[in-house]
Image: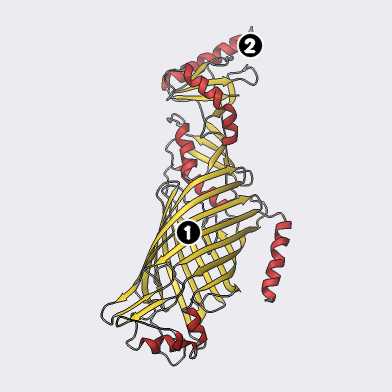
């Protein structure tokens, strides 16, 4: 009983937070960048990403060529712009992961979840979501390695057929 | 030759040491392009001693580079050197024969041309710490001074002309290799006043570059000093020079008995030059290359050997207010 009360309270707080400011509840993204080896190249990618107005800070792992990108609170986060910056720097994303705060603790495959002003379509679920905070992986031509995207291609196409307006929707899995 | 053997021994040794590759080639361009909106500048210097005059010859250039888009990079290079006279002396036959001699008037150190270069990366196959890239390039060069060798050089200052080609760069963890296949078409140099024309030969370039990161093996931050080793082969094939004076074809045979070096510099040739170099990168931005060029198979007659070169490059990142 206590637990469900706590859940209810959390949900209430989250729904209040999301409805009042309307901004996304993504505070950071964890990305892998392909095609990089030298620190000079990593530096150019980091400086490119830093130019985005909604980015607060970026922490690059030079050996693994991965980065944590921290977003400003109450800022309009645009993940497509983040992917474009990496592409325009001459590199590509190997993976893009974000921690999403959900308004409920269970999500079905094919369900669209709203988080602030962003919408996420769960294309598949590797395991059931049971918490309100979940790490999810973005599925898209510019968000994951080319080889990996080819495995998702048919599922993405099918999802696109189901949804009328796909312009503001990110396809995801967990 | 000994140095060369040592070098050829070092390459497989470095490969076996499992070090990381680099593709920031000092003597050639990689297929990679600059990030969109990024401005960079490079100072370049080449120096050698002219034989037999023992005069020091200098060539220097300032290059500005800009990422127009993530795939298109533009470069503008302005050059200055003491490689050429302002125009052919009236007694150009004497000039051709004797300009490497100590008794001859040294060429002035003057700004002598510019080069505009565009590179478009049309294919990238990226993976974790590796990539394969293809790029096309095109260039235009303008020279304000006369060139008196068969080998064309579109770097600015030597030949006015156009060129273009293909670059393939492969980075595979510890191994980076880049291949450039390019054509160069120098235009005819015309001196209307003296009624002299000179045309260097058309050329094919097929350069091959290798690069390795010696230090650090693992990064701990952007402030780590990077040391990279490069071995590049500048390979070129070109036609002989064609000259006219007062409307008549100039036969270079008379030079053959005066100066073999000058005579050869006007003939068709095929050569390979090896350019080992060391690169130091400070704060993941400022890049300093120091290297030397040696003949490998035949030689270039544009410069004497050894030719030393230094590059200093820096990117100007936009300041972001956070």
- Answer yes or no: is residue B21 visible: no
Please report the residue visible at 47 percent of the width from the left and 30 percent of the height from the top.
A73
Tell me the SS state at disc 1.
strand
How many C-alpha atoms fall within 10 Å of the one at disc 2: few (<14), some, or many (≥20)? Answer: few
Above or below for A151 versus B150: above
- Answer yes or no: is residue B135 visible: yes
Tell me the SS state at disc 2.
helix
Please report the residue visible at 46 percent of the width from the left and 38 percent of the height from the top.
A84
Q: Chain of mark 2?
A: A
Residue A146 image-quadrant placement: top right
Q: In the figure, is residue B26 to the left or right of B3?
A: left
Please report the residue visible at 36 percent of the width from the left and 86 percent of the height from the top.
B92
Q: In the figure, is residue B97 to the left or right of A60?
A: left
Residue at which label 2 appears: A3
Q: In the figure, is residue A20 to the left or right of A61?
A: left
Residue at which label 1 appears: B314
Q: Chain of mark 1?
A: B
Q: Nearer the viewer, mark 2 or mark 1?
A: 1
> Are the residues flagged by discs 2 and 1 from a single subunit?
no
- The residue closer to the viewer here, A12 or B171, is B171
Above or below for B314 versus B237: above
- The residue closer to the viewer here, A132 or A80, is A80
Question: What is the x, y in percent for residue B2?
Answer: 70, 76
Q: Which mark, residue B63?
A: none
Specify the quadrant that holds the N terminus of chain A.
top right
């Amino acid at each position: 009983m206590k637990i469900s009360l706590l859940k209810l309270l959390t949900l209430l707080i989250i729904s209040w937070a999301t409805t009042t400011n309307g901004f996304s509840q993504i505070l950071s993204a964890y990305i892998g960048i392909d095609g990089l080896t030298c620190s000079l190249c990593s530096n150019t990618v980091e400086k490119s990403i830093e130019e985005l107005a909604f980015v607060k800070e970026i922490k690059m792992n030079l050996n693994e060529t991965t980065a944590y990108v921290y977003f400003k609170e109450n800022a309009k986060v645009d993940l497509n712009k983040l992917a474009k910056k990496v592409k325009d720097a001459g590199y590509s994303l190997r993976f893009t992961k974000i921690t999403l705060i959900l308004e409920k603790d269970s999500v079905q495959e094919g369900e669209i979840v709203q988080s602030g002003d962003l919408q996420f379509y769960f294309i598949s679920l590797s395991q059931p979501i049971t918490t309100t905070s979940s790490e999810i992986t973005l599925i898209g031509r510019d968000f994951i390695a080319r080889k990996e995207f080819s495995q998702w291609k048919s599922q993405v196409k099918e999802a696109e057929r189901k949804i009328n307006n796909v312009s503001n929707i990110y396809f995801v899995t967990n | 030759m000994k140095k060369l053997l040592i070098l050829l021994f070092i390459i497989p040794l470095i490969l076996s040491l499992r070090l990381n590759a680099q593709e920031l080639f000092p003597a050639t361009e990689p297929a990679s392009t600059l990030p969109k909106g990024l401005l960079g500048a490079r100072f370049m210097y080449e120096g050698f001693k002219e034989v037999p005059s023992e005069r020091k010859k200098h060539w220097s250039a300032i290059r500005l580079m800009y990422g127009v888009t993530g795939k298109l990079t533009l470069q503008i290079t302005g050059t200055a050197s003491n490689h050429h006279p302002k125009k052919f002396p009236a007694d150009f036959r004497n000039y051709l024969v004797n300009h490497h001699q100590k008794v001859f008037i040294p060429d002035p150190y003057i700004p002598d041309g510019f080069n505009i270069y565009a590179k478009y990366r049309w294919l990238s196959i990226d993976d974790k710490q590796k990539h394969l890239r293809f790029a096309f390039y095109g260039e235009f060069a303008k020279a304000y001074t006369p060139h008196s060798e068969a080998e064309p050089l579109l770097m600015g200052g030597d030949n006015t002309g156009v060129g273009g080609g293909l670059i393939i760069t492969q980075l595979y963890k510890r191994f980076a290799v880049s291949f450039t296949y390019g054509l160069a078409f120098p235009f005819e140099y015309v001196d209307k006043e003296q009624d002299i024309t000179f045309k260097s030969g058309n050329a094919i370039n097929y350069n091959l570059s290798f690069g390795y990161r010696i230090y650090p093996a693992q990064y701990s931050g952007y402030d780590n000093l990077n040391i990279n080793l490069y071995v590049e082969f500048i390979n070129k094939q070109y036609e002989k020079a064609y000259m006219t004076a007062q409307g008549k074809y100039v036969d270079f045979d008379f030079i053959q008995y005066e100066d073999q070096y000058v005579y050869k510099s006007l003939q068709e040739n095929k050569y390979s030059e090896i350019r080992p170099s060391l690169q130091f990168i400070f704060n993941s931005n400022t890049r300093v290359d120091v290297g030397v060029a040696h003949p490998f198979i035949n030689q270039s007659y544009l410069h004497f050997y050894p030719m030393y070169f230094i590059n200093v490059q820096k990117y100007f990142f936009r300041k972001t207010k956070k």
